[in-house]
Amino acid sequence: MKNKLSFKQGLKDALPICLGYLSVAIAFGVLAVQKQIPLWAPPVISMTNLSGTGQFAALDLLESLASYIETACAILIINARYFLMSVSLSQRLPDDIKPWQRYIVAFGNTDEVFAVAMGQKLPLTFKYLVGMIFCAWIGWVSGTVIGTFAGSIVPDALSSAFGISLYAMFLAIIIPASKDSKPVTYTVIIAAATSCVFFFTPYLNKLSSGWVIIICGILSSALMALKHPIAEVQDEQ
């Protein structure tokens, strides 16, 4: 059928995502080596995860010797948005999709893949989504491998410059959303202010960075969820 989304079309639509992931993943690989993570670990992490923000944040937590529970909770909070995205995407999946196919789609449901998939006018197919996910995954893993290799040979002064990529990624996420929504702006301000309280207050500044991320994230988002709840859109049908 000509009007059916194919695996090849998924590869084509995800090519810009692949190229974007390539550059960010290179920075991730370089930073991982800079933080003394074994050379085999960054590619394995990227092969089993598709979470740029979460992986970058995990580097700092691992460097600070955060506990596994602390790291897991922090990454869970950072990636909580994927729960909502997955629920939304699941409404567009074919009725006959199998559970194991849902697991694959859930694994590759990144912000960019979700945006492109939800923008499709035609019904989504499993083959199309797999094509998108595979293309994006290749870019992410390939970039990590390149970055890990480059980080092992380039001077420390040059590799340390890649540290700005973490902050650039967070700014790229929060600035557009803050411009479009005042509650998001307030959430960012509250989170930043709470973080400053933990940093400058005696005794509180002894709390590890992982738990500070968890507390600031939950507190700021909970306050805004209570103050500015999103109105549910009732289905007229």
Image (cartoon, rainbow, N blue to C red):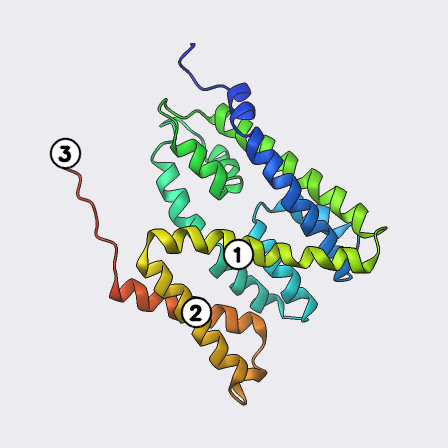
N-terminal-most mark, 3 or 2: 2
Question: For the residue marked with disc 1, what is the amino acid?
Answer: Phe
Callout 2: SS = helix
Quadrant of the rendering where the C terminus is positioned? top left
Decide: is 65 above or below 22. Answer: below
Which residue is tagged 3? 237
Callout 1: SS = helix
Find residue 167 and report its horizontal and vertical position in percent: 58, 59
Residue at 41 percent across and 43 percent down: it is 86
Q: Quadrant of residue 63?
A: bottom right
Q: Is residue 79 left or right of residue 43?
A: left
Give the Cα distance between marks 3 and 2: 39 Å
Question: 10 Å neighbourhood of mark 3: few (<14), some, or many (≥20)?
Answer: few
Which residue is tagged 2? 191
Find residue 196 and report its horizontal and vertical position in percent: 49, 77
**Residue 170 numbered mark, or none:** 1
Decide: is 54 above or below 96. Answer: below
Decide: is 153 above or below 218. Answer: above
Quadrant of the rendering where the N terminus is positioned? top left
Q: Do the residues labelled 1 and 2 touch (CB within 8 Å)?
A: no
- Tag nearer the camera, 1 or 3: 1
* Observer able to see residue 80: no
Find residue 22 and report its horizontal and vertical position in percent: 65, 39
Q: In this view, does 66 lie to the left or right of 83?
A: right
N-terminal-most mark, 1 or 2: 1
